Image: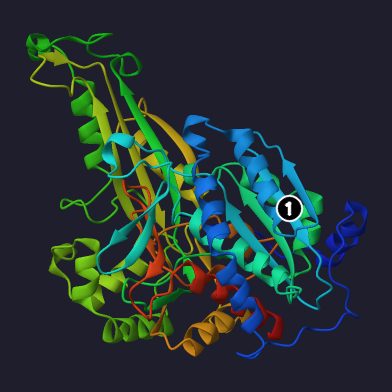
Amino acid sequence: MDDRILSATDRRGLMLMAGAAGVALTSPTRLLAAAPSAGDLAGVRKAIEAQRPEAIKRLQDWIALPSIAAEGRNVQEGAQYMADLLKDAGFQHQSIIQTDGRPGVFATMDNGAARTVGMYFMYDVKQFDPAEWSSPPLEARIVPRPGLGKVLIGRGAVNQKGPEATFLAALHALRAAGRTPPVNLVLVAEGEEEIGSPHFGQVVHRPEVLAALTKCHEVWMPFAAQSPQGSVEVDLGAKGMIEVELTCTTKAWGRGALDDIHSSFKAELDSAVWRMVKALSTLVSEDGNDPAIDGWFENVKPLTPRQKEIIADQAAHTSEADRKTFMGVQKWVRDLSYRDALERLASQPTVNIEGINAGYTGPGGKTVLPSKATAKLDFRLVPDQTAGEAQRKLKAHLAKRGYGDIDVKVTGGYDPTQTEESSALIQASLGVYRRAGLEVALTPRLAGSWPGYIFTGAPVSLPAGHFGFGHGSRQHAPDEYYVIESENTKLRGMAGATEGYVEFLYALAKS
């Protein structure tokens, strides 16, 4: 999962477009719904429990239809399915917005409330190889998982169909209990998050979408935020990123053989693979851990004293051993202390090689001198870097060192994002988690990325982040899972997470 932004232009002008777009949302004369007491939610809890089989089936059916942007798989079908799910959940308006890439979905729900809240969904998922899974990735089977309870295994289980289906279950439960959601909703969904959201701006910047978003106070996305032990971290932003494919060919280089040739000729011919390796090595420090691209740190903003304080508190109140066990970590980079590792995670941009492909990689050997090498990389960015700046500096760095023939293809990316600790979004999140008795820690930013910059930057300029109970893991990996029934009283399963979204909507309504 990955982040982004826009700026504050004339919001009054944008609001005037709402009428022209036919988007009916909140009126200032409507009354704010009161926050419920525990007793008030009894009917909703009953509805959640009664609808559990239906909610699980809805998630399983959704997982069975994978929309994979990288493969062009179920592109239109995925968008239509997303729109249908939103209609079934009570959104009065849903429209599919075509882009130069995969389509987006725009939906609104007018509940006659005083506050309007923006939401972000993604309907696409990562690729998968069924041979690597212990359970078929599209069957969404529910299996026991020691230490957690019953989990649903499937591609998209936690990233992000599980949390999103759980939020939709909350809307279904409110309706079944005879309740109207306490806020109006403006929702935008995309089908390209897993390839860096290259066309999401074309969805959000549509006049009718911008006009609806001007009525919102914040934008958030459902998220399974709990650790296996039940604790929660609330992120005050996220890193940005660009995802890049580098291609080195002997033809573009003008050296070596034009095609693969017997390796015995290496003595008199240049190698595209070694050229790629040498080029990659210029991007990082000797140990591979620090970016070494010219000017890369020019706009990197140091952590503030408050952000360092937040990290120190996080280190003091979370278990380093539990985190290492959960992540399968042996040592932190350069044998750093736990606090220093957390500080580095929040503050440092990164250069990561996702994969390299060249020549023969099958059984046994094949004495070949390849004429082509490709490498896929991702670059995580921190404030105040931008995706555009990163792309320019990467290309300039390679060209300056004589690697200008290496093709640099940026397949997607986002700027970093930051949301104020004092915002209603963050304070409502903290309040709901704490009232549930959870251990809660703030973090300066999520180390991963999402296209939140579209919302926190101009012209939308709103706080943006994540909220949600529940747990899942192995995003992008085999056996991705989402907890359906939890063995731990602190860790909520799907039903408990559904109730949590109801609580959160009422908390936002009070903000």
Count of numbered tags: 1
User: Is residue 296 in view?
Assistant: no
User: Is residue 448 in view?
Assistant: yes
Q: Is residue 494 left or right of residue 107?
A: left
Q: Residue at x 44, y 57 (%)?
A: 158
Q: Is residue 189 left or right of residue 367?
A: right
Q: Residue at x 28, y 61 (%)?
A: 145
Q: Secondary structure at mark 1?
A: helix
The image position of residue 475, as x and y in percent, is 37, 53
Q: Residue at x 81, y 78 (%)?
A: 114
The image position of residue 293, as x and y in percent, is 33, 48
Quadrant in the picture for the C terminus: bottom right
Rendered image quadrant of residue 258: top left
Which one is nearer the viewer's eye here, 262 or 390? 262
Quadrant in the picture for the N terminus: bottom left
The image position of residue 130, as x and y in percent, is 33, 36
Residue named by callout 1:
87
Amino acid on which disc 1 is placed? Lys
The image position of residue 137, as x and y in percent, is 38, 42
